[in-house]
Image (spheres, rainbow, N blue to C red):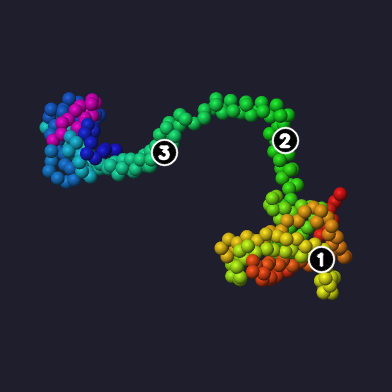
Amino acid sequence: MWLKNTEAQKIPFFAWDAAADPQKGKAGDSGNMTVYWSLDGGGEVAPSITEVGHGWYYVSPTQAQTNGQMFTLAVESATADVSIDPVSGSFDTIEAKVDTIDTATAAVQAVTDNLPNSGALTDLATAAALATVDTVADAILVDTGTTLPALIATRAAQATTITVRAAVTTDENIELVQGDDYLDADGEAATWTIADYDGPSLTSATALLSIQNRDDYEAATTGYALQKAGSVSVDGTTVTVKVDLTAAETLALARSPYTDGEHKWSYVYLLTVTTSGGTKATHVKGKANITKRIA
């Protein structure tokens, strides 16, 4: 392969001595030779000839003499019975390949330059430093009488026993366990949120939760199993009502019975809000279920 626009290249050719028997290469004949070099079919020039030996010679075209697509080389000898076959070929263009390599190299460099220490990574933890950390961690586990797999297993087992509870369900019913506290301080108060409220102003309003036995409610009799005041907060058009229920209050509520495996609600509740001007409105009505606490 010959390269375009590149000096110091060697184009070989062979000179036959037809008078020899058998035929062989003609040595020492470079002084009798005339070179005809043509680039892309243009005018002929005469590169220098160098003898290799045993009938082999080569020409060394200049850089300008290779700045084309193809070449033809014809050499004639003034010596009788010397025959030289013509040579032709093409030049390979490597500029595009070099440009592609340069582009890829620049893209890699753009990434490595953004790594710590411009790609040297000298600030990253060495294997020795990581081994030290590993040794310290192992020592801690020994001191605490644990192993990492056992610790992970313990944490996994603990995670499976966590229960999240809410006094007010998503369908606005109340679920309580006898003897449990439902306090705002613990983030577990019975809570109702009214979005996009557009009624009378509830600034400085008060709330009252009334829980009544279902049979009494349906019979329209008076009396409540529990009544508890709550707080009202307003944030734009969002109203939040919270009522704290203590362990003593939930313990006093009779548990809800079950019939043939089906849930039977024992209580009905009303959430009434009273404005600062004395206007009362029942904003929520729902069912209440009491679950017996396991001693």
- Judged left or right of residue 102, residue 186 is right
**Disc 2 packing (10 Å; few <14; some 14–19; many ≥20):** few
Which quadrant of the structure image shows residue 79?
Answer: top left
Secondary structure state at the residue bearing disc 2: helix
- Residue 6 drawn above or below residue 274: above
Q: Is residue 50 magenta?
A: yes
First along the sequence among labels 2 and 3 = 3
Look at the image and tell me whether residue 167 can be seen: yes
Closer to the chain start, of discs 1 and 2, is 2
Q: Is residue 82 inside the magenta stretch?
A: no
Q: Is residue 13 above or below residue 263?
A: above
Check contact, mark 3 vs mark 1: CB within 8 A. no
| Near-viewer residue (77 or 184) | 184
According to the picture, the residue beneath numbered tag 3 turns out to be 114
Mark 3 or mark 1: whose residue is earlier in sequence: 3
Residue at left offset 58%, top offset 61%: 235
| Magenta segment boundaries in residue numbering | 46-61
Q: Nearer the viewer, mark 3 or mark 1?
A: 1
Of the pair 99 and 56, the residue shown nearer to us: 99
Image quadrant occupied by the N terminus: top left
Q: Which residue lies under the disc numbered 1?
A: 224
Front-lying residue, 135 or 257 = 257
Residue 121, image x and y in percent? Answer: 45, 31
Left or right of 265? Residue 52 is left
Local SS, label 1? loop
- Please rate how many residues cluster around mark 3, counting C-alpha atoms within 10 Å: few if below 14, some from 14 to 19, many from 20: few
Query: Whole-percent x and y of residue 139?
Result: 66, 26
